[in-house]
Image (cartoon, rainbow, N blue to C red):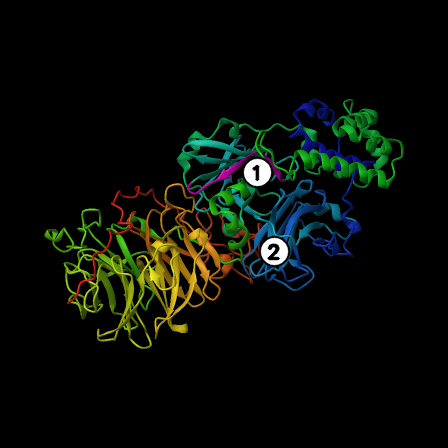
Amino acid sequence: MAGLFNNLLVLFFVFQNICLGFRSSLSVFKRYKDTTRSFSSECLGSHQPVMSLGLSDFALDIRMPGVTPKQSDTYLCMSVPLPMDDEAYVVDFKPHASMDTVHHMLLFGCNEPSSTENHWDCDEGTCKDKSNILYAWARNAPPTRLPEGVGFRVGGETGGRFFVLQVHYGDISAFRDKHKDCSGVTLHLTHQKQPLIAGMYLMMSVNTVIPPGEKAVDADIACHYKRFPMHLFAYRVHTHRLGKVVSGYRVRNGQWTLIGRQSPQLPQAFYPVEHPVDVSYDDTLAARCVFSGEGRTTETHIGGTANDEMCNFYIMYYMEAKHAVSYMTCTQNANPELFRNIPQEANVPIQIMSDMLKMTHGHHEETKDSDKSSLLQQAKKEEEGILEQSDFYSLLSKLLGEREDVVHVYKHNPTEKAESDLVAEIANVVQKKDLAREITNHDERDSTNLVRDRIQSEHGEESWEKEHTGDFHIEEAVEWPGLALKLGQVSGLALDAENNLVIFHRGDHVWDENSFDNTFVYQQRGLGPIEQNTILVLHPSNAKLLHSLGKSLFYLPHGLSIDKNGNYWVTDVALHQVFKLGPDKQEPLLTLGVAMQPGSDKNHFCQPTDVAVDPNTGSIYVSDGYCNSRIIQFSPNGLYLMQWGEETSLGRAKPGQFHIPHSLALIPDFSQLCVADRENGRIQCFRLQTGEFIREIKHKSFGRELFAVSYVPGLLFAVNGMPYPGEAEPVQGFVMNFSTGEIVDTFIPLRKSFEMLHDVVASEDKTVFVGDVHARAVWKFAPTESDGEHKLDSSSGRILGRVRGKGSSGLNLGNFFASHKSYSRKGFDRVSTEGSDQEKDEDEGTDSEEECSAPPTPPAPSSS
């Protein structure tokens, strides 16, 4: 009976924060004292770690292997491998622990645990590689379920292959009888692919000091969010004994939206966000913990022991699978002034009855070694306000509504099976009102479906079902300052041998409707050539200018490429010429075409768009261009060799026909040349030696225009144009499998928006630069960390220094604090933190004129 009361009472405390109507009823428990110990020593389920739950689902039991901690504030770890190699998703967590023995539990996901022993002291670390927090538990919190269609991704190519359980044993007086502890958690996993991926965002103070006797001390945390949208559905607060209230908010345009607010002295469950909150790029996430130092005689610091303090605000979120980041942290206060406007509720402690507080802290030492039934009787005699069992069952019946038969069975036949059914039913009711599988927002549809609808509306049904597959993903490198560069219209991009970024831009010249007459003769020659250096060489990480040239040479720059010897090859659509420039030479080494004379013969171009040089043969290929529909091949010294292509006929464009061959990507591995056939919205690939058509790559998501293409071994990168009125395909970048042409990823920026993309270039490490002719900007994109190529920054001041020491790089909430002031627990690893990656506010894009989308009808070919 006492065990049931203990478990039921905890569920009631959770229910208290959800069902306001029962607050008065629950208050009758104010003098109740816990007199039982966890059943964890029985190690239930530990002999069957993997249990089938059907064709695609299974349960994984993760338990401590019968341990007895020798001293208080011991952190013990153990690992369990994922029982298969393919991808799976965790959709449910069921804890097995009691706060009279366990202070808190954390579950990590990683690829290599710090030890191969069946358990170890967590001072040795949790994981050798980067770890993600998947689950957290404290104070007899109930189970945690995820919304329908949401899961933590594990296994496969990118998910962790091990679970590491970390258990903090606080006060070990419960182990006086030397019993073995098997606390842990059971996971429900499924092989069914989840469209939305769950993650954990941890906000944590690391340097708060609480003076003795101080009535109210605030610990504030705030970070700017710099990623794709995430949707918050649950939160959990955590402090030790001095914490009074913890509150978390999203701040957008000065408006504070509550994520969650809770007393850390109640069961530390993941509570549902009352109204689901979305977080977008450049929002601020803010949290405040309020402590009291009353009763303490010395300063209290952040640390891992029960006498230290913690200020943690956990957020569970989900993201669209292709953008998903599984774990993020915020450990600083980026904007102290922000908290001048925090809602007053964040400063008001949540009052908890004193005896309830004692129970939640496990203050029942006086009852531990006594007979449980006699203690219950004694407690009933001593406390007038205790709830009678008949009233208790009546209240249960009210709470369970139509399931009061379950209560009736247990009341009159209190068997172990009936007790189990009763606890399960109450947990089910709480779960439905708490972390329910269907998150509703009053009149709105299920948020999971809303998100899926949003994804489909943005990318199209075909895109969602077929193209957004695979784990490769790139996203904007927000630390790249390219958007702040002072550039003209950006027309061409290339990477040199050192992977420095080379930009070809138009300075103070603009291509608009007044630039050419109907015979394509440039009309603004009187302006003279561009007086600024039009070729800029920038460091790829910090955009520092390394070199520049091209002053007084060009009128309207367009295409750019670099050969294996480091020479720059450029086109100018006003001059109708192609130039070869040495990296240290101001005058051209080679010039093709006749200045200011458009034409269609072997010696003339008409607005040539791009140039590529074969590294094996030195042959030169020119796409010509806006008024001609051809590709011309020249020898290394500039002699005409051959050409192919023709103007697009009416109806569907045929192979070899062009409507503005706009960009070239040379594929030396396969002796191919791929062309962005702009107005036909496709890529055409040809054999270098003969110009023979090989294949077309065309997707609905390209829209009507495809501006540029770039190649790295195995992949093609491309960017499209703005949609026509009434069309929905967004301006975006594409990553394609070169062999199949299948889209494996798309990318858009986090900051600002694409306007009129003009060129794209990628390096072999899959870093991508995109030039926007209208926004006069260059974006940088890089693979996410899950691809093993590029480390993700957290949305706050990122933790660049991983947890150092004995093979550890995971976040151990014990050893995390070792490097901070006044904390010196022996053996804890040290951690270093670096400054913030927050971006400064940027000016809006300039209002430059758009480049002509399509030229007038070309004249009859001229002869010379």
Vertical placement of residue 297 versus 568, above or below: above
* Residue 806 horizontal/vertical position (percent): 56, 62
Residue most toward the bottom?
617
Give amino acid for label 1: Ser
Query: What residue is pinned by disc 1?
Result: 447
Q: How dense is the environment of label 2, judged by Cα within 10 Å: few (below 14), some, or many (20 and up)?
A: many
- Residue 474 lies, in percent from the top left, at 45, 55
Which comes before the other along the chain, label 2 or label 1? 2
Residue 766 in view (yes/no) = no
Measured as percent of width and height from the top left, residue 89 is found at 63, 52
Q: Is residue 278 magenta?
A: yes
Residue range in magenta is 270-282
Residue placed under numbered mark 2 in the picture = 154
> Which SS does the magenta portion mostly show?
strand
Task: Tell me what residue is drawn at x 31 percent, y 66 percent.
Answer: 496
- Asked whether, in this view, residue 150 is left or right of residue 97, the answer is left
